[in-house]
Image (cartoon, coloured by chain):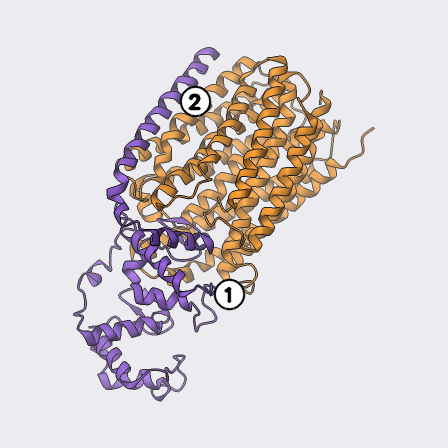
Chain colours: A purple, B orange
Amino acid sequence: MEKKTARNLFIWGTVICTIVFIWLTIDTHSTIPKRTNTDKLTDEVVLGKRVWHKYNCNDCHTILGIGGYYAPDMTKVYSTRGETWLKAFLKNPETPDPQRRKMPNQGLSEDEINKLIAFLKWVDGIDTNEWPPKPITVAKVTKTPIDETLQLLKGKNLYNQHRCDLCHQIGGQGGIIGPDLSKVGAKREKEWLFIQIKDPKSHNPNTQMPAYPQLKDEEIQAMVSFLAGLK
Amino acid sequence: MTYESQKIALKYFVISAIFFGLQVILGILLILKYIWPDPLIGILPFNTARTIHTNLLVVWMLFGFMGGTYYVIPEEARTEIYSKKLANLQFWLLLLGGLVAVIGFLFGWTAGRPLLELPVELKWAIVVIALIFIFNVFLTMKKTKNWTAIQGLLLGGIVMLAVMWLFGIPFFKNLTLDYYYWWWVIHLWVEGAWELIAASLMAFILLKITGIERNIIEKWLYIEVALVLFTGIIGTGHHYYWIGTPEYWLWWGGIFSALEPVPIILMVFDTLNHVRHRKIEITNRLVLYWVVGCAIYHLIGAGVWGIIHTLPVVNRWTHGTQVTTSHGHMAFFGAYAMLIITIIYYALPKLKGIEKFNQKPGFWAFWIMTIGMTVMGLAFGAAGIVQSYFQRGLGMDFLVVQEFMKPWFKAVFFGGLGFFIGVLIYIYDIIKLATTKTV
């Protein structure tokens, strides 16, 4: 091959590839409204995206799999954690375990939290060609939803609000400091669970689990109903 | 050195080396945050440290490329640089911009987009600096109209670099489109514009050290950059699998990015071939090591590590894990860090009129850096495989899996510490060479 041929190859090849790429870009744009639900892309969502940028969240967390790998991916966080959990966590991300990787408290205002959650809710709806993939094993567990009566729902929300998941796992979600609660309803009586939450040291004086004196008895009852249903 | 104005390159090289060192210090801080509870969380949290780490990388590489260009252009165009004043002004502006950015990041002044954290004001400042650079380089070439492929492609690379940068400036309301055009900067820089610049600079060095005819070197240069752009432009699609863009990107991206190693294999073959059939004796053995090392590491880090997880069936599980970190570190080191070091080791002695110098530190730096980076890359890769399996495959909680990855993070730390020692030797050597008094 002569140098001139190589040069023409370079010029025309680049031009053709650029044209194909631009054509694909135009076509991609035409699919964006449907794939990303742009009708739900409200001003609040956009303001939420600005909050996301303002605190540089993306350099610890990935979203759509892009960003820092230091903290969990945010693409599906809305549907996996739920609004109650997100609100509680964003207000106070502290964890009781000093060994655990921490998220600094960003001091977000109520308004900022709501906007950020609106943004995450919208992101959750993006058609990502089924990414992140469904795990091979826990797909079975998550497919059978717990029968959510009002009492159970209250218990579940309390479980989330008080961040029990930092130490305990249910269906593969949560920490490993405390025991896995996925099947706790089959192992423990309701009375036992009630006492464990009210005064953990009564069962085991050396337990690491803190007491929760701020919980009312009826709230503990709701959590017990929720936990007893996990079998 | 034949032209007085080539001397401008000197200060670009020195700053490039120093910023490289700072980048690695930040890198070590980052890996420590993965291993132990972070005592600096209140002053320098992970996100800020990562911002500084990655932006310093970009800045030291820009200093390296710009210095390299100012060294190469006068020799290729056979004339002095159009304006030494502008080249100096551009240097100080970039240095000032870099320092303002780092201090700004420490105080939370950020645009909050990964790798493009520069606030919009500073992004426009970069545009101004790039325009000064393009203007100065273009007018130098225009003075003699002695067009060569090397300078043509170098100019093309710089212009492409500036044009793609513009797509990183606006605020996008839609996250999917945000990332669609984010990749026009990130991907089309590293697999487009930077490749053009790097390939041209490498061709220049091969031309000078081997004495092979210009026609042959430039012919290969054209073929390589042609293949780089054929595969690289549409290969951007390997970033469009999971961000909300249509499914056909799995095919376009998969096929074109699978071909991306082809030009890199060609570069290795071509480099070795030129070196083997050299017409003149290579006196600067150190440069020869970095040239060949660069070609081979480019192939491993960018080519092999890239193709391993570019196919959609693999990427579905590895996307957003430490596998990407492994690839990123090894590819940047092989493709660009080693290239810039090559140019500096070639050009710096010439600028100072040094015929022979003690190459021992340079060789130590070569081996320590290469081995350190390999340890880091493999350890990041192992951490990424653990993460892909337990987190994505078994669906375990993110933070639980991070605990399983800690042994590998510790290996990254030791590799990184070794790498840092190599970098310190390199900085010491560069500063020593740059400050040598010559008669």
x and y percentages locating residue A101 in the rendered image = 45, 64
Marked residue chain, label 2: B
Q: Nearer the viewer, residue B246 or B282?
A: B246
What is the quadrant of the C terminus of chain B in the image? Answer: top right
Q: Are marks 1 and 2 on the same chain?
A: yes
x and y percentages locating residue B405 in the rendered image = 43, 58
**Labels 1 and 2 touching (C-beta < 8 A):** no
Residue at image mark 1 = B37
Marked residue chain, label 1: B
x and y percentages locating residue A95 in the rendered image = 43, 70
Identify the residue at the far front of this view.
A43
Q: Which three-letter amino acid code belongs to the residue tagged 2?
A: Ala
Identify the residue at the far right of this view.
B439
**With respect to residue A151, does B281 lie above or below?**
above
N-term mark: 1 or 2: 1
**With respect to residue A100, does A193 lie above or below?**
below
Work out whether residue B279 can be spotted.
Answer: no
Asked if residue B100 lies left or right of residue A119, the reply is right
Residue at image mark 2 = B226
For image coordinates 42% across by 62% down, the residue present is: B403
**Label 2: how many Cα within 10 Å (few below 14, some 14–19, many 20+):** many
